[in-house]
Amino acid sequence: WPVVVLTSLYSLAGLGIAIVNDFKSVDGDRELGLKSLPVEFGIDGAKWICAGFIDTTQLAVAAYLYAIGEATYAYVLLGLILPQVGAQAVYLLKDPVQFDVKYQATAQPFLVFGILATALAVSHHDGASYWPF
């Protein structure tokens, strides 16, 4: 079950990352009648939805890791969220159209390290006997 829960949660973070890619094409989406989140909710609404998906997902994963007794990994994940929130404040929430690439280049490595830390936590956990190694 941990793999199913965590995969589902990180899929929501992936949705947040996908929204970042929609900002650069909002004008074309609008012209073509495509209903991307920035078109439907406006750039200001979509940037908060994007940040919310990414941050809430990782906070939920950290809480889950803590709940299953992997507190150290939960704290590591919380530490990896901080630079992402900083990048959101500096780039994503300031101007997601202008700074989408800078935001992704700054924040995504920390998200990926968080995913790796989560995988280590689950493989390290006592209930991980279903892992092949």
Image (spheres, rainbow, N blue to C red):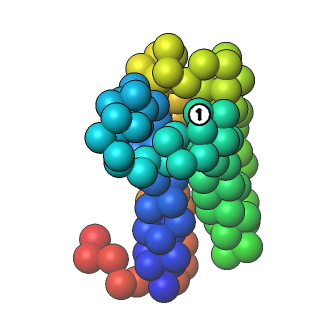
Q: Position of residue 70 (x, y in %)?
A: 66, 65
Task: Return the residue at label 1.
Answer: 43
The reply, left or right, for residue 83 in relation to residue 38 is right
**Above or below 49: residue 44:** above
- Confirm whether residue 54 shows in the render: no
Q: Position of residue 25 (x, y in %)?
A: 36, 30
For the point 73% across and 73% down, which residue is it?
Answer: 67
Crowdedness near tag 1: few (<14), some (14–19) or many (≥20) residues, C-alpha within 10 Å: some
Looking at numbered disc 1 in the image, what kind of residue is underneath it?
A: Ile
Viewer-proximal residue, 77 or 120?
A: 77
For the point 71% across and 23% down, which residue is it?
Answer: 89
Q: Position of residue 86 (x, y in %)?
A: 69, 24
For the point 35% across and 48% down, which residue is it?
Answer: 34
The reply, left or right, for residue 43 in relation to residue 120 is right
**Above or below 120: residue 79:** above
Viewer-proximal residue, 82 or 21?
A: 21
Viewer-proximal residue, 4 or 132?
A: 4
Identify the image quadrant of residue 48.
top right
For the point 44% across and 68% down, which residue is it?
Answer: 7
Q: Secondary structure at mark 1?
A: helix
Q: Quadrant of the C terminus?
A: bottom left
Viewer-proximal residue, 98 or 10?
A: 98
Q: Position of residue 104 (x, y in %)?
A: 45, 27
